[in-house]
Image (cartoon, rainbow, N blue to C red):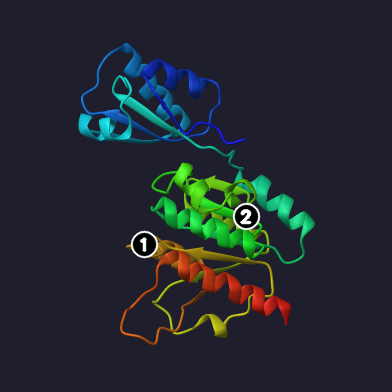
Amino acid sequence: MEKPTQIYGIRAIIEAINAGETIDKIFIQKGLKGDLSKELEGLIRKNGINVSYVPPEKLYRLTKNNHQGVIANISPITFYELETLVEKVIENKEAPLFLLLDQLSDVRNFGAIIRTAECTGVDGIIIQKKGAAPVTADTIKTSAGAAFKVPIAKVDHIKDAVYYLQASGVSVTVATEKTTKTIYDVSFKEPTAIVMGSEDKGVSPSVIKAADQTAKLPLLGEIGSLNVSVACGVFLYEVVRQRMD
């Protein structure tokens, strides 16, 4: 069953954090003061929750309810720990397929990617705790419910996930235009993780450097790039094609 995706009010959010709710992001009105707000900010720091300090207008666009200067987005799904996810998949599958999303920010792109991932047999999706698109009602809708089917893990840094996957015997391929290899030059038959980047900046240089290999899509027109969800679909179906041979 899908859980509520938004709560508001300082005390309600404090109670949600203490109850172990999976909170994607908290919006706090700039200049908010008081003992409760200090308690909340302490919990945010302790739990590493993504937070943005915003003007009142932003909060009123998010809800018409009495928000008391604070709104929290609660994830409708439960996230996995990276180690738990990877170990479970590797134990049960000879050639697992993971998908890493480096700072993807659009929730509808995220939902479309999750849907394609489910259709192509992706065993797990890994995103960054801060700066990544949250799993919202729009994400769930765009994914056609696939967000409840594909395990998703959150990590502090995508680069850390790359290193952990490599240590677990998984080859990491970054999707980037800054390479001479196309997806047709790379083998995806072994245990594989594919890294897709953000809509505007692509994959961060440190992640590209840490990866085993890079690959790009051949672009024959005048436009220099594809929408990230479309590009991701092409990458994932090339994995399917190779593994069906």
Q: Residue at x 48, y 18 (%)?
A: 15
**Could you say where residue 111 lies in the image, as x and y percent from the top left?**
49, 53
**Could you say where residue 169 lies in the image, as x and y percent from the top left?**
68, 64
Q: Residue at x 57, y 39 (%)?
A: 77
Which quadrant would residue 54 be assigned to in this image?
top left
> Marks 2/1: CA distance?
21 Å
Q: Residue furthest bottom?
A: 220
On screen, residue 121 versus residue 178, left or right, reads right
User: Quadrant of the image for the N terminus?
Assistant: top right
Q: Amino acid at mark 2?
A: Gly
Viewer-proximal residue, 123 or 171?
123
**Could you say where residue 167 lies in the image, as x and y percent from the top left?**
64, 59
Q: Is residue 123 above or below residue 139?
A: below
User: Quadrant of the image for the C terminus?
Assistant: bottom right
Q: Is residue 223 visible?
A: yes
Which quadrant would residue 168 be assigned to in this image?
bottom right
Q: Residue at x 58, y 41 (%)?
A: 79
Q: Amino acid at mark 1?
A: Glu
Label drawn at residue 199: 1
Mark 1 surroundings: few (<14), some (14-19) or many (≥20) residues within 10 A: some
On screen, residue 111 versus residue 145, left or right, reads left
Q: Secondary structure at mark 2?
A: strand
Residue on which disc 2 sits = 124
Q: Residue at x 49, y 22 (%)?
A: 16
**Could you say where residue 17 lies in the image, as x and y percent from the top left?**
49, 24
Viewer-proximal residue, 241 or 43?
241
- Mark 2–mark 1 contact, CB under 8 Å? no
Mark nearer the N terminus (2 vs 1): 2
Q: Residue furthest top?
A: 35
Q: Secondary structure at mark 1?
A: loop
Q: Is residue 153 above or below residue 56?
A: below
Q: Is residue 162 visible?
A: no
